[in-house]
Image (cartoon, rainbow, N blue to C red):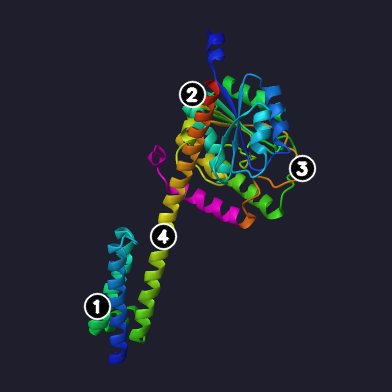
Amino acid sequence: MPIRLKIFVVYIGLTILVGIIELVRQRKLKEEYSFLWLLTGITLLIVTLKYDLLVWITQFIGAELAINTLFFLGIIFLMLLSLHYSIKISLLTTQVKNLTQKLALLEGEKEESSEKV
Amino acid sequence: MENSTTQQEKILVVIPAFNEEERIGAVIGAAKKYLPQAEILVINDGSTDRTKEVSLKAGAKVIAHAFNLGYGVAIQTGYKYAVRNNYQYVLQLDGDGQHDSAFLPQLLSKLKETDNDIIIGSRFLSGKKYSGSFVRLIGIIVFRKLVSTLIHQRVTDPTSGYQGLKKQVIEFYCHDFFPNDYPDADVIFILHKVGFKIQEIPVIMYERKGGRSIHSGLSPLYYIFKMMLSLFVNILRKIPDYKI
C-alpha cells in the first residue's frame, strides 16, 4: 500500500475512533450505538497497519486489489449498520405503538371518570 | 342460569375510524339499532376532521390516538380497551359504512351458540363480486387458497374487517405479534396454529361512498410481498413464540 494512502486511511480510522468516543463522552451517542462505528475504526486501523492481513483477506475472498477489499469491508459495515438501525426502528415502532395505545386508553378512562364526577 | 349469565355478558362493538365525520354517525346509529345491548367504541385514529365530535354525539365512546397509527393498531386499541374493561365479546366493523350492521346480531349469535372463537363476515360467501384492483384480487385469491390449504378449512375472505371475537381471541390479539397495518391471512393462520376455531358467515359489504378507505393504505404489490413473508415466517415459528 502506498505510504500516502496508508497515512490517509490511518488518519480516517483515528478520526472515527476519537470522534465516536467524544460523541459518547458528550452523551450525544449511546454506547450501544457506538459499537459498530468503533469496530469500523479499529478494523480500518488493523487492516492498514497490518497490510499482510489485508493481502490475506484479499486473496481469501478472491479480490484482485487490496483497496477493493477495503471498499468491500466498508460496504459490509454500512449494510450491518443499516440492519442494526432497522432492528432498532422495529423495536421503537412497537414501543411507540404500545405507548400511544396506553395513552389513548388512559385518557379515555380519565374522561370517563371526570364525566362521572 | 343461562339467562343470568347472558345478562352479565358485556358486548363491545369496536369501530376504527380515520377522518370519517360524514359516515361514522350513520354507522354508530345502525350498530345501536341492531345491537342495543352493546356498547359502541370508536377508535379515532388521529383524525383531523370532526370524527370524534360526531361519534360522541351519536352516542359512542371514543378513544383517540394522538396521531394516525394505522388500521391494525386502531383495532388493537379496541381489543385492549375490551380486555381492560372485561368484555366477553367484541364485534368489529369499519367506520366507513361498507359493512352492513344488520349482520351484527348474526355474528354475535354465532359466537354465543357455537364453540367457534372467531366469526368472520365474508363478502364472497354472499356471492358479491370483488370490486378492488386486479392485482389485489389475485393476491386475495392466492392467499385464501394458501391459507385454506394450510389450516385445512375453507376461508373465502381473509381480509374482512367485519368480525366477531370471543374473549380468549381478544386477549390473544393484544400481544405484539398483531400487525400494525392489516390483519389478514397470516393472522388467520396464527389463530389456527394456536388452536382457535374459525367460522365464516356471509355478510353484505357496500362500496365506499367518497373519502379514503382505512383499508386503502397497502399497495397491491407490497401486500403480496408482505403476506408471503408473513405466512412463511409464521410457518417457521413455534407455538410458544405466540404465548407472550
Provide the chain ID for the residue under circle 2. Answer: B
Q: Which mark is residue B12?
A: none
User: CA gap, disc 3 to disc 4?
Assistant: 41 Å
Q: Secondary structure at mark 2?
A: loop
Q: In the image, are marks 2 and 3 on the same chain?
A: yes
Give the residue pinned by disc 1: A46
In the rendered view, does B7 fall on the left or right side of B35?
A: left
Q: In the image, are marks 2 and 4 on the same chain?
A: no
User: CA gap, disc 3 to disc 1?
Assistant: 65 Å
* Image quarter of the C terminus of chain B: top left
Q: Nearer the viewer, residue B79 or B201?
A: B79
Q: Secondary structure at mark 4?
A: helix
User: CA gap, disc 2 to disc 3?
Assistant: 35 Å
Tell me the magenta residue range.
Answer: B222-244
Q: Which mark is residue B209?
A: 3
Provide the chain ID for the residue under circle 4. Answer: A
Residue B105 horizontal/vertical position (percent): 66, 23
Q: Which mark is residue A85?
A: 4
Q: Which mark is residue B86?
A: 2
> In this picture, is B32 found above or below A23?
above
User: CA gap, disc 2 to disc 1?
Assistant: 61 Å
Q: Which amino acid lies under the numbered mark 4 shown in the image of this protein?
A: Tyr
In the rendered view, does B241 fall on the left or right side of B50?
A: left
> In this picture, is A88 found above or below A53?
above
Q: Secondary structure at mark 1?
A: helix
Residue B32 horizontal/vertical position (percent): 68, 24
> In this picture, is B154 found above or below B103?
below
Lower position in the chain sequence, tag 2 or tag 3: 2
In the rendered view, does B195 fall on the left or right side of B99?
A: left
Q: Nearer the viewer, residue B230 or A41?
A: A41
